Amino acid sequence: MSRKKRNQVFTTIEVIDAGAKGKTVAKAPDGRVIFLTNAVPGDVVDIQTFKKRKAFYEGKAINFHTLSEKRTEPKCEHFGTCGGCKWQHMKYEDQLFFKQKEVTNNLTRIGHLELPEITPILGSKEKYFYRNKMEFSFSDSRWLTLEEIQSDRDLGDKNALGFHIPGMWDKILDINKCHLQADPSNAIRLEVKNFALENKLSFFNTRNQTGLLRTLMIRTSSIGEIMVLIQFFSDAKEKRTKLLDHLKETFPEITSLQYVINSKGNDTIYDQEVVCYHGRDHIFEEMEGLRFKINAKSFYQTNSAQAFELYKITRDFASLSGNETVYDLYTGTGTIAQFVAKKAKKVIGVEAVPDAIMAAKENADRNNIENTEFYVGDMAKVFDQNFLAKHGKPDVIITDPPRDGMHKKVVEQLLNVEAEKIVYVSCNSATQARDLAILDEKYTIVKTQAVDMFPQTHHVENVVLLKLKQE
């Protein structure tokens, strides 16, 4: 008895929607949903499935009968292989439409929330070259396209400096030009690679844990400062010095040139010593007259211009008069806390990462802000009666948690505190909806505003204003 094939081909199927994680949605003849990685809503396609589940298929379009009016020509030569900008083939106004739709659907379907009139999503002025931080990986065996594999020609150099292929931890796509970070980012990356090849500096092999060059990080700021950090697998001083000196001479505009020697099994630098080779060990970013110090390990919003818009919306939603005590949860390096401080009586920032709190205090001192206080604490435990008695009951709480949202205990503490207003900033409207559903017991949603921080991707931020219900 032959086994039934799990992979199927469906012909002449219309793509009807955009779903989570940048995938688009179609319907199979049997009623199941099909999630696609390479189509745009409005396309009519033939689909090859490669995964079948009880309620859905996953597949890809293998033939296009009709191309959607929502399509546009991708700018990047690496689109379709690199997984960084999955929506480049969709017009920007349609990207915004589907991002807004996702936020609204999550709040209403997951949270079962009653929403006020939706404020239209705020798009980004810059559609490309908007990121201030990029991280690239070295590999001695670059990812080969199917066309290259099937060809008879000499593929030449196998080294790569670029991005991980989606879902493949050890496969690196060599990048010629990336459209996410402004110049001189591409020039620096290409110069590092060319110098390494010319001087026979070995590229890393993740599986074998061999090679010298491991990762390259480039950070830039809106005031023209540049940080370059190279991660080496071993301490080859002569080769390291040769490369770093070359960068220093070729790009005198580099503000901070640093390196890490990392011989452990993963690329994270947060438990590693960062050595400043030339210039400062940090760069500065500025926003509305405030100056923020950013070091190699700092978290800072990766779209500086749109972060400014996000913070303005957050401050507008808080609608401060100057008399309020504000708690800023998940404050990070205190950017939002300092941004709203001039409109508040005092701002209390809480964050679980000690280094971030140290940076927040330094930045507040540098900006001559005297009405902020920052504390290290487990967010699920911080709101005890002693903390509230010491700092006062907050009139406004701003919370900007990670993608997983707030711990259930934190949400319960917010209900107990009963601040008059909560401004909830989220990079994941699904977990935001989950938390808002709990807060619905005592709070009403007054405003909601989506903000597009990452054009050409499916990611979207959302800000919600909650007000305490009156008994």
Image (cartoon, rainbow, N blue to C red):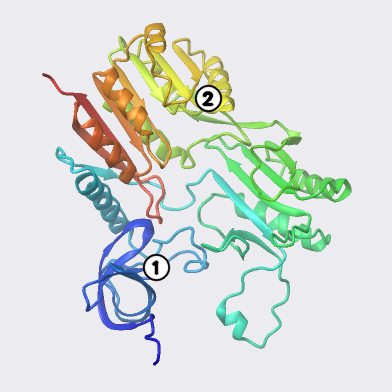
> Residue 5 at what x, y percent from top left?
39, 84
Dot 1 lies on which element? loop
In the depicted view, which residue is nearer to us: 427 or 291? 427
Q: Check residue 37 in the rendering and tell me which mark sits there, or answer none.
A: 1
Q: Could you tell me if residue 228 is visible in this image?
A: yes
For the N terminus, give its image quadrant.
Answer: bottom left
Camera-side residue: 447 or 369? 447
- Which quarter shows the C terminus? top left
Tell me the kind of residue under disc 1: Thr
Q: Amino acid at mark 2?
A: Arg
Direction left: furthest residue: 471
Residue that appears at 71% across and 46% down: 230
Where disc 2 sits, the SS reads: strand
Residue 99 vs residue 380, the one in the foreground: 380
Of the residues tagged 2 and 1, which is closer to the observer? 1
Residue 55 screen position, x and y as percent: 28, 67
Task: Confirm or deny contact between disc 2 and disc 1 (CB under 8 A).
Answer: no
199 shown above or below 387: below
Alpha carbon of mark 2 to alpha carbon of mark 1: how far?
41 Å
Q: Seen in the image, is 21 located left or right of residue 261?
A: left
How many C-alpha atoms fall within 10 Å of the one at disc 2: few (<14), some, or many (≥20)?
Answer: some
The structure residue drawn at horizontal position 45% and vertical position 53%, both measured from the top left corner, is: 128
**Residue 109 screen position, x and y as percent:** 21, 49
Disc number for residue 291:
2
Mark 1 nearby-residue class (10 Å; few <14, some 14–19, many ≥20): some
Name the image quarter holding residue 52: bottom left
The residue sitting at the front extreme is: 1
> Residue 176, relative to residue 424: is it above or below?
below
Q: Residue furthest bottom?
A: 1
- Is residue 319 visible in the rendered structure shown here? no
